[in-house]
Amino acid sequence: MLTSIFGSLALCVQVAFAIFPRAPIVALPKAPSGPVVSRNGTQLAPIDTVFFFDQLVDHTNPSLGTFKQRYWHTAEFYETGPIILFTPGEANAEPFTGYLTNETINGQIAQQQNGATIVLEHRYYGLSNPVPNLSGENMKFHTIQQAIDDLAYFANEVVLPQPNGDKLSPATTPWILIGGSYSGALTSWTMVNQPNVFWAGYASSAVVEAILNYWAYFQPVREFMPANCSADVEAVIAHVDQVFTGNDTTAIQALKDNWGLGELTFLDDVASALMENLFDWQSLQPDVGPGATFFEFCDALEVKDGVNAPATGWGLDTALPAWGSFWNSSYLADICGDDDVSDCLGTHDASASFYTDTAVDNADRSWFWIVCNEVGFLQDGPPEDVPAIVSRVVTTDYSFRQCVDMFSDVFASTADVPMAAGIANVDSKYDGWNVSIDRLFFGNGLRDPWREATVSADGVDRASTATQPIAIGDGFHTSDLLTDNGLVDPTVLAVQKQGLSFMKTWLAEWTPPSTSSKRDEPQGRRVNSSRFFRS
Ligand SMILES: *[C@@H]1O[C@H](CO)[C@@H](O)[C@H](O)[C@H]1NC(C)=O
Ligand SMILES: *[C@@H]1O[C@H](CO)[C@@H](O)[C@H](O)[C@H]1NC(C)=O
Ligand SMILES: *[C@@H]1O[C@H](CO)[C@@H](O)[C@H](O)[C@H]1NC(C)=O
Ligand SMILES: *[C@@H]1O[C@H](CO)[C@@H](O)[C@H](O)[C@H]1NC(C)=O
Ligand SMILES: *[C@@H]1O[C@H](CO)[C@@H](O)[C@H](O)[C@H]1NC(C)=O
Ligand SMILES: *[C@@H]1O[C@H](CO)[C@@H](O)[C@H](O)[C@H]1NC(C)=O
Ligand SMILES: *[C@@H]1O[C@H](CO)[C@@H](O)[C@H](O)[C@H]1NC(C)=O
Ligand SMILES: *[C@@H]1O[C@H](CO)[C@@H](O)[C@H](O)[C@H]1NC(C)=O
């Protein structure tokens, strides 16, 4: 089975699915263990205790009632401090309860400020679903605006399982919203759209700007991977593009066979499969050693008879068979297991189960709905003037077709997929790179493949200010959220220390909002969900 969008984060759930764009998902902290004891010595409920919140199915029409939204909570460090809300975003939230503890920046802030922490499962993920299945029709309540409204409604209405739990709304207590990756963007978008709920925000690797053709995902990878490895990957990819766009069927077949992919009919599936090795970069963290899959891949290409290639690499003749041998000896089996290669890596069969299975708790499917309707982020080959570590045979059309195959009950053809309009709406409504909001902290990493969608993107040049600081270290994706990363990388520690310091300053400035502003209507227009469906 192919590793899911979560790559080698190795969530317990791995689903058989073909190549989708990689999702911007927050890093997984260590699973908490042992009993939890409050500051006064009282034994508290275990960290994995599940609580349920009655969330509105549709914030534009409360008469549709509520569904059970799962959350986890602890008052381990609580002594009348802030309430710290976090959602992992596009995942079943169960493996992410480490975000309640001081293994993460969330818990560090709670510990510093005597606050309580919450992990809230995002609607349409895990077991928090307003609908019985994930058919296209049933996705009508799955919008970024509904997710923003969930966070605000939760903060205003929840009765927390702790002392005074019914008196801790944002009217009487400062709330802090934290997120990373997509949920980092959601943090920024929520503070723009619902300005009077969260007093402060911490957004790590926040992909605030939705971008349709996101070839730039691979720019930080190319820039920071070993030079010999990028040189050789470029050489192989140039060769692949030359052969795959030519007419020599014998050469095409031989090239497919190099990776054990001879039975794949479509060349875009072969070219897309080769992206997997580059996607492994997203799983890197400062505390991950040289044994990580990405570095095993580079070692396979660059170490010959115990000797490292020079910075220019070995060249095509060595790199091509070396890459093939890496797949043949372990990589293909690692991603596809016993599955047939066509089932695992082919995307052209619309009757395949990963398109037709609408069962809930399928993060890939739920995320792909957001991809097709609101954020894009399609990872593909770069423009001709940019060196390519990913084949240009993979274009945005590769994903557009899959939107239709996945949600065939609402999209008759690619013309029905409202991706471009949805992205324009998201970027104008929630301000994208132009965000300007008080008490919002951005933490970023130079080596993050998602950096080009953050306020630290090359050429975006957002200034760091005292009210909206931007701290950047050498980290990877959402590295500053995990305590361990600060222990091994002083630049990540510096990001975390700035975040903690700003939270301290801002919480000292807290004043209760005036009652009139508490229930202000969100600014900007509501998404008209009917535009998602063909008439
Ligand atoms: C100790 O903390 C627990 C949980 O936070 C609370 O229920 C209890 O009332 C506290 N006891 C005292 C004596 O403060
Ligand atoms: C983190 O919290 C635990 C209790 O859960 C505590 O024992 C430990 O000292 C804390 N770590 C730091 C660095 O404060
Ligand atoms: C999905 O749920 C809808 C109700 O929302 C139901 O009508 C439909 O039959 C379900 N589809 C499947 C495949 O279970
Ligand atoms: C491939 O063949 C087609 C027609 O058979 C021709 O139009 C095209 O130019 C050829 N392409 C290359 C790269 O030779
Ligand atoms: C060459 O590749 C090896 C093995 O992956 C790596 O350790 C080394 O840093 C690389 N050297 C250069 C100059 O890129
Ligand atoms: C990989 O295995 C295939 C058979 O599945 C073979 O045709 C190909 O030559 C192998 N590649 C390398 C580089 O050995
Ligand atoms: C950001 O501001 C610039 C200049 O005012 C404008 O051209 C651009 O469209 C804005 N972008 C977004 C996403 O709002
Ligand atoms: C929503 O869009 C549909 C179709 O484009 C339109 O008929 C309807 O009037 C819109 N509703 C609102 C409230 O804008």
Image (cartoon, helix red, strand yellow):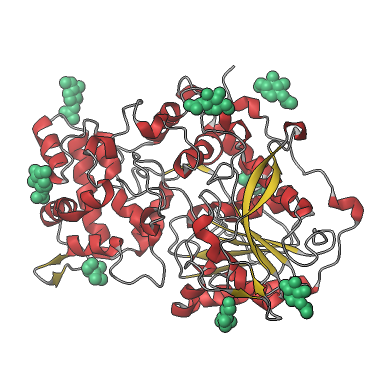
Q: Nearer the viewer, residue 372 or 74?
A: 74
Q: Nearer the viewer, residue 245 or 295?
A: 295
Q: Is residue 185 visible?
A: yes
| Residue 489: percent from left, percent from top | 45, 77
Picture quarter with ligand 5: bottom left
State left or right for residue 325 relative to residue 450: left
Q: Is residue 428 visible?
A: no
State left or right for residue 438 relative to residue 446: right
For residue 122, above or below residue 423: below
Examine the image and state in which quarter residue 500 appears: bottom right
| Residue 89: percent from left, percent from top | 56, 51
| Residue 328: percent from left, percent from top | 15, 50
**In the rendered image, which quarter contains the C terminus?**
top right
State left or right for residue 388 relative to residue 109: left
Q: Nearer the viewer, residue 261 or 136?
A: 136
Examine the image and state in which quarter residue 284 appears: bottom left
Examine the image and state in which quarter residue 142 appears: top right
**In the rendered image, which quarter contains the N terminus?**
top left
Q: Nearer the viewer, residue 131 or 246?
A: 131
Q: Residue at the spot x=21%, y=56% of the render?
A: 232
| Residue 300: percent from left, percent from top | 18, 61
Q: Residue at the spot x=29%, y=53% of the render?
A: 277
Q: Residue at the spot x=84%, y=63% of the render?
A: 172
Q: Residue at the spot x=51%, y=43% of the render?
A: 211
Number of marks? 0
